[in-house]
Amino acid sequence: MAVGIVPSSGGIEAGKDYPGETTMYVIIACIVAAMGGLIFGYDIGISGGVTSMTPFLKSFFPSVYRKESGIQSSNQYCKFDSQILTLFTSSLYIAALLASFVASWITRRFGRTWTIFYGGLVFVVGAIMNGLAQNIAMLIIGRLLLGVGVGFASQSVPLYLSEMAPYKMRGALNQMFQLFITVGILIANVLNYFTNRMENGWRWSLGLAAVPGLVILVGGIFLPETPNFLIDRNRSEEAKKRLQRIRGVANVDEEYNDLVAASEASKKVTDPWHRLFFDRKYRPQLTYSVALPSLQQITGINVVMFYAPVLFKTLGFGGDASLMSALITGGVNVLATFVAIWLADRKGRRTLFLAGGIQMFISQLVVGGLIWYKFKWSGEGNVSGAYAIIVVLFICAFVTGFAYSWGPLAWLVISEILPLEVRSAGQSVNVSLNMFWTFVIGQAFLILLCHLKFLLFFVFAICVLGMSLFIYITLPETKGIPIEEMSRIWSLHSFWKKYIPTEDGVKLEEI
């Protein structure tokens, strides 16, 4: 059941209508910051393409090359099963996990923009090392540095976007982060398609990751800091001028006073980690900071996105055909993200979560069935052109469902429900768990595909069904509620009210 908050007599309005407009200044700032998603997306897209390139496999993973070329095995399910190969892909996410805790402290102490800058700087160094790699050690070290950059960007960018955006446009502007993740994936897929035809083209694919890194490095220098951070660092006059600039009006007293009140409350919290984990008041925020990033990864989306060329080769596609199929899914991913940007502030978060969940559930069942029909348990066989098109269509349907629901909304909801006093800590939990589960799924996928075969896609389908039920039961609607007043929805929700005391002056309206 969705809930909304309306003012009662003498109460505080949770649906305040702050004066101001969506200025070009704030739109440009949000677009530049959201480009932090490019480094995350580029890496997701580039790694799967590179690990399907024959020169790369010959140079660093000869045993995988022998299986992939059919010299050692004709089992389609197991041809890419290699722990070292998956470690190349997934090591980045362990580094990002650990980096997110450091980024949490930097974000709170030095600001969102400096965290973005440092993320870009480390990412550029990692990209150069990967492009020049002479052995597996250089590859892994470069990946670890890339992971630090991704961890910093994923920690700081969603917070920056939520704090800069007017609350009525928060859904659309915040989801630019996910949009640029999808753009990064698409750019990587395009590059992979062309560099696959070059001698040692994999070096270009890996090395050009420095370009999106440079974008956010420069962006971090010139981006304006958020009013929330300026107030938190006692730069009140500067904060008020910044708020007037980004809202486009002189009268920002009501919103400014609310930000000051939130900052004063946050300063009373000396240990945000302890409060987040042990104070019942933050039980919902902790639950979603843990659940949403974890559930987002067990949809199987990163299996499709960063192993797409490998997956399509496993299904019997040729080298160019597998990269082209990955390029198609990357394009669909970008287009579908615009659906979320358009509808999140119109239809709400819950509607998109549930619609996307149903679509992903059906798509995974169909993909699993198609793979079973063609390869059975033996894993031997090939697909015809028409059959391949059907497989790609349903994988695109799955990607579409994710791209307008769990992809952008998991980042959005967490960044908007966290109170200022635990915001950096909660976002760090979100990022670290997102990276942890990305690592686990990435490291285990090729093993699971080898042993569970087509059943793996049915497992993902069951996970999607369970997480959709979780959203239906527990998540209140958050659209249209100012970020500093979000905490009021929990004591009024049918599920959470048993854990959170009701505040005076606010009542529930079912919608």
Image: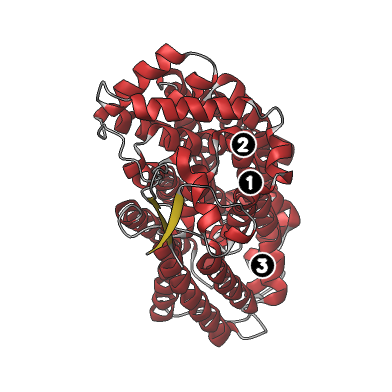
Q: Position of residue 86 (x, y in %)?
A: 68, 54
Which amino acid type is marked by label 3? Answer: Lys
Can residue 58 be spotted in the picture? no
Toward the viewer: 366 or 474?
474
Give the mark toward the camera: 3 or 2: 2
Query: What residue is pinned by disc 2?
Result: 422
Which amino acid type is marked by label 2? Answer: Val
Toward the viewer: 321 or 221?
221
Q: Is residue 167 above or below residue 458?
A: above
Q: Residue at x 51, y 82 (%)?
A: 370
- Residue neighbourhood size for the residue with mark 1, other residues' Cα within 10 Å, grouped as few (<14), some (14–19), many (≥20): many
**Disc on the earlier residue, 1 or 3:** 3
Q: Residue at x 43, y 52 (%)?
A: 478
Give the mark toward the camera: 1 or 2: 1
Which amino acid type is marked by label 1? Answer: Tyr
Toward the viewer: 191 or 444?
444
What's the CA distance linking mark 1 and mark 3?
A: 46 Å
Query: What residue is pinned by disc 3?
Result: 79
What's the CA distance linking mark 1 and mark 2?
A: 9 Å
Please, what secondary structure does the residue beneath circle 3 have?
loop
Q: Image quadrant of residue 122?
A: top right
Can residue 273 be spotted in the picture? yes
Please, what secondary structure does the residue beneath circle 1 have?
helix
Query: What residue is pinned by disc 1?
Result: 282
Color encoding of the figure: secondary structure
